[in-house]
């Protein structure tokens, strides 16, 4: 959004408040005039927004067309070669010479002999697949790096000392030096193994790769979400704010966050948190969530801060005995957190190790390298509310037990006097509860 649109958006919100103030003072005629001005401003906003959108789309299409014409044939060859190599590995067949030659055009080496480096085109498709509504990656800063470790220097927030007066021909006095903080990153290897049956090979090579892309995207999203939530909790630990009233929320954006950060701030919460926010009203009885003028299906807090909602599974509540602590992350996650990723996604395929041969299966090992680092620890504030939760029926199957969080399992064990001494892993806790409650399946 351009500066012109942002300024107009701020004026629209100010005019809305002006209309409300006139109504509160029973100044109906003044309110009508202000409403007419508001409608005109809104029309201007919509026209400008549409024009900017068209211009941006045209520029993107021009760039894409140029890139497509210059490298489409080469990229297609590399992608096809990768697909054929995957299929050959799965079938334990020798790779075709032309596929090896096309694949060599990547000009990169992998960490382990025999691994297949995924081409950029496929990596881009995977990236698009993983950016679903629950992908927190879209909210933080993502930086591609070529080294395994490194650092960034950021300026620490500090009160600025103004310049002194300087007389004509006088020497300039020394001023205060800015304070900096070094933030280090170290990319770590992340990965897992997908077990596939021989029957999958009956599909075309493109279908095999499509299946892989969806699985990789799902795992990558879950990995990034977990890293981001861990970074959020690290930044805000011990500094959480209990949200008792609407004013407590306003205090976060007006006082606790720096004004420069508040301008680009959002509020991140889960389904339970959104439900609580959506019912909240101010002292005048007006809902504090308002439609976003640029995206009518989405809401904004106080008409200023976009609300991002993810599932309860992604951003979990802390379940207590009869209530739940619901999180609200306020601020700029792009300023607070950076993912440093070394884009070198690789596949390693084996049909012999791990007992795969006996089961007529194959293991596809996927690995990537990244790190998630807290950059500006003052860019977000975590609030929370305690809400009552309905009484849930006790699980009847192991599947239901496995779907519960560790905290929920411990509460269930406590409720049923199940001894969890020495049980640290989730699997051990599930088995202990299943035995005590006589759950066999």
Image (cartoon, rainbow, N blue to C red):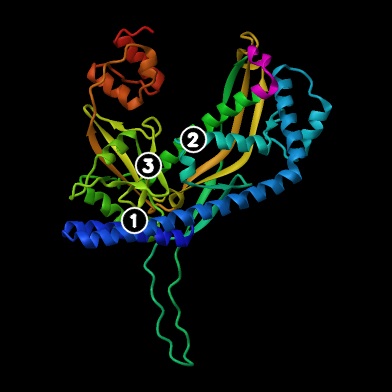
Residue 132: image tag: 2
Label located before the other in sequence (2 or 3): 2
Q: Secondary structure at mark 1?
A: loop
Pointers 1 and 3 in contact (C-beta within 8 Å): no
Which stretch is magenta?
A: 198-207
Location of the C terminus (image quadrant): top left
Judging by the rendered image, the residue that carries numbered circle 1 is 257
Please give the count of numbered marks on the rendered protein: 3
Q: Which x, y percent locates residue 424?
A: 37, 23
Residue 48 covered by magenta stretch: no
Disc 2 versus disc 3: nearer the observer? 2
Disc 1 versus disc 2: nearer the observer? 2
Q: Nearer the viewer, residue 31 or 18?
A: 31
Judging by the rendered image, the residue that carries numbered circle 3 is 233
Q: Nearer the viewer, residue 427 or 77?
A: 77
> Residue at coordinates 56% horizontally, 37% vertically from top-left?
128
Q: CA distance from mark 1 to mark 3?
A: 17 Å
């Amino acid at each position: 959004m351009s500066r012109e649109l942002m300024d107009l958006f701020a004026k629209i919100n100010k005019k809305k408040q002006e209309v409300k103030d006139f109504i509160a003072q029973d100044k109906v005629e003044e309110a009508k005039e202000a409403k007419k001005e508001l409608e005109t401003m809104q029309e201007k906003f919509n026209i400008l927004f549409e024009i900017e959108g068209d211009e941006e789309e045209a520029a993107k299409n021009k760039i894409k067309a140029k890139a497509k014409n210059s490298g489409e044939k080469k990229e297609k060859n590399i992608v096809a070669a990768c697909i054929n190599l995957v299929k050959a590995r799965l079938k334990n067949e020798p790779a075709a010479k032309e596929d090896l030659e096309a694949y060599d055009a990547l000009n990169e080496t992998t960490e382990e002999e025999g691994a297949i480096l995924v081409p950029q085109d496929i990596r881009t498709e995977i990236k698009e697949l993983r950016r679903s509504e629950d992908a927190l990656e879209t909210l933080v800063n993502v930086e591609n790096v070529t080294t395994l470790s490194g650092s960034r220097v950021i300026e620490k927030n500090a009160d600025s000392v103004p310049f002194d007066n300087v007389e004509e021909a006088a020497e300039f006095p020394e001023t205060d030096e800015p304070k900096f903080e070094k933030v280090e990153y170290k990319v770590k290897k992340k990965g897992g193994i997908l077990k596939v049956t021989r029957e999958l090979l009956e599909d075309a090579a493109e279908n095999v790769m499509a299946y892989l892309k969806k699985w990789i995207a799902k795992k990558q999203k879950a990995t990034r979400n977990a890293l981001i939530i861990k970074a959020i909790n690290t930044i805000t630990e011990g500094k959480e704010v209990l949200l008792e009233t609407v004013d407590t929320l306003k205090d976060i954006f007006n006082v606790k966050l720096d004004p420069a950060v508040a301008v680009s701030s959002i509020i991140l919460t889960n389904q339970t948190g959104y439900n609580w926010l959506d019912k909240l009203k101010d002292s005048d009885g007006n809902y504090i969530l308002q439609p976003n003028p640029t995206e009518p299906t989405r809401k904004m807090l106080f008409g200023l801060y976009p609300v991002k909602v993810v599932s309860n599974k992604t951003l979990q509540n802390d379940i207590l005995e009869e209530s739940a602590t619901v999180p609200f992350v306020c601020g700029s996650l792009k300023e607070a957190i950076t993912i440093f990723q070394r884009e070198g996604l690789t596949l390693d395929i084996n049909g012999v190790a791990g007992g795969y041969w006996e089961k007529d299966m194959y293991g596809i090992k996927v690995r990537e390298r990244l790190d998630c680092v807290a950059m500006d620890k003052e860019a977000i504030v975590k609030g929370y509310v305690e809400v009552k939760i309905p009484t849930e029926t006790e699980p009847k199957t192991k599947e239901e037990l496995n779907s519960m969080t560790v905290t929920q399992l411990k509460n269930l064990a406590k409720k049923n006097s199940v001894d969890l001494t020495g049980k640290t892993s989730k699997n051990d806790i599930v088995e202990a509860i299943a035995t005590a409650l006589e759950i066999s399946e």
